[in-house]
Amino acid sequence: MSQPTQTRQWLLTNKPTSMPQLSGTSPTFTLETTSIPALKEDQVLVKPLYISNDPAQRGWITKGVDPKRLYVPPVPQDGVMRARSVAEVIESKSEKVQKGKLVIATTGWAEFSVQDAKACQVIEPVEGLSVTHFLGALGMTGLTAYYGTKIIARAGPGDTVVVSGAAGATGSMVVQIAKKMLGCKKVIGMAGNDDKCKWVESLGADVCLNYKKPDFKKSLIEATEGYVEVYFDNVGGDILDLMLTRMKREGRVAACGAVTDYNKSRDEKSGLKNWFEIISNRIEIKGFIVMDFQATGKGPEVVKEMVKAFKEGKITLGDENETVVDTKFEEVPRTWMLLFEGANTGKLVTKLV
């Protein structure tokens, strides 16, 4: 194919304070067509094939957020919506990243993207696995789960671990890492419907609780009899508040996400009622960002460790670990919004068609 000269891309034109809007007079995102700049030395032109959808992206686009309080710069006003992709190199001026290679790159929501070759991670395919897993279990998601469970929460064989959002991309990997790689005594998951709970249990959770059921609190208290050492928190809100009452003395909370509040205005966000539990029971709560772990240079060896665990049958990676949605480019924001509807099991991936 001849080198394209133009690309469509989605811009962040109206930063949201609550739920992003895909239509109306002030849509959050706007589709535009622009020219593709000529390649410079050590640059490549890539075509995204699969786009990663992550709850963290919501935090990058909030109106009025102080950049000094974010771990990455916010997406700028009228900038291309940021996202990582599995992309094909269609033109190259780099000896290291050649035409035809598949790479992981931060392309944003664009049909084509010019990238510095040094910013692209060439994918080394794993037999029996879709390349989409390099956006999930073998990518940032898997590293987040590993870092939070093993390093931040220091989970080990004698521990009971509770995981919220256990049917999501990160939570489903936490379940497997805790139970099958770290040998934790008991793993308890939480998910939003019975089918998801059954799937989480198939991954290795001893039990998974449907947090939407009326008797959820009672069930959680029964499942955590004797209290627990570790809580991996993906949701924040009322579930975090409840879990503070179920932690053992000197228990550890790995604070990974707060999806409960991502699309709420400041006045709508929930607060903690059980704060004194942290003091009286000496509970340790630590927030973490996976990029800190990546900076140590240990990411590639952890990915190799997880590939080895997959090949040995210790962890499950397959179609059931991800929700891949065929998506026309003009529908990219709509697929992303499925994150906040609980529509995905495992990693939510956009497949451009």
Image: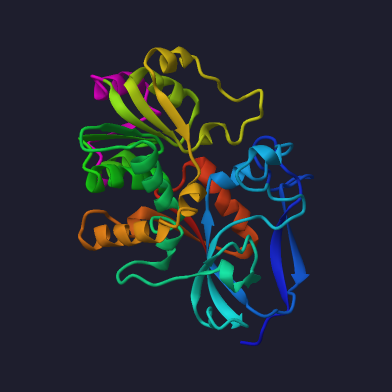
Q: Does residue 288 appear left or right of residue 210 in this picture? A: right
- In the image, 199 versus 145, the foreground residue is 145
* Residue 347 visible in the current orientation: yes
At horizontal 77% and vertical 44% (from top left) the residue drawn is 26
Quadrant placement of the C terminus: bottom right
The type of colouring in the image is: rainbow
Is residue 209 shown in magenta? yes
- In the image, 96 versus 220, the foreground residue is 96
Percent position (x, y) of residue 211? 38, 29
* Residue 352 visible in the current orientation: no
Q: Does residue 274 appear left or right of residue 72 in this picture? A: left
Percent position (x, y) of residue 172? 35, 46
Percent position (x, y) of residue 45? 63, 76
Quadrant placement of the N terminus: bottom right
- In the image, 202 versus 251, the foreground residue is 251
Q: Is residue 67 above or below residue 33?
A: above
Q: Does residue 135 appear left or right of residue 17 in this picture? A: left
Q: Is residue 153 above or below residue 303?
A: above
Residue furthest out toward the front: 296
Q: Is residue 1 above or below residue 191?
A: below
At horizontal 61% and vertical 35% (from top left) the residue drawn is 263
- In the image, 154 versus 219, the foreground residue is 154
Percent position (x, y) of residue 205? 25, 39
The image shows a total of numbered marks equal to 0
Q: Does residue 206 appear left or right of residue 123 in this picture? A: left
Question: Where does the magenta region start and end?
Answer: 202-226
Q: Is residue 193 above or below residue 216?
A: below
Residue furthest out toward the right: 25
At horizontal 40% and vertical 20% (from top left) the residue drawn is 244
Is residue 124 shown in magenta? no
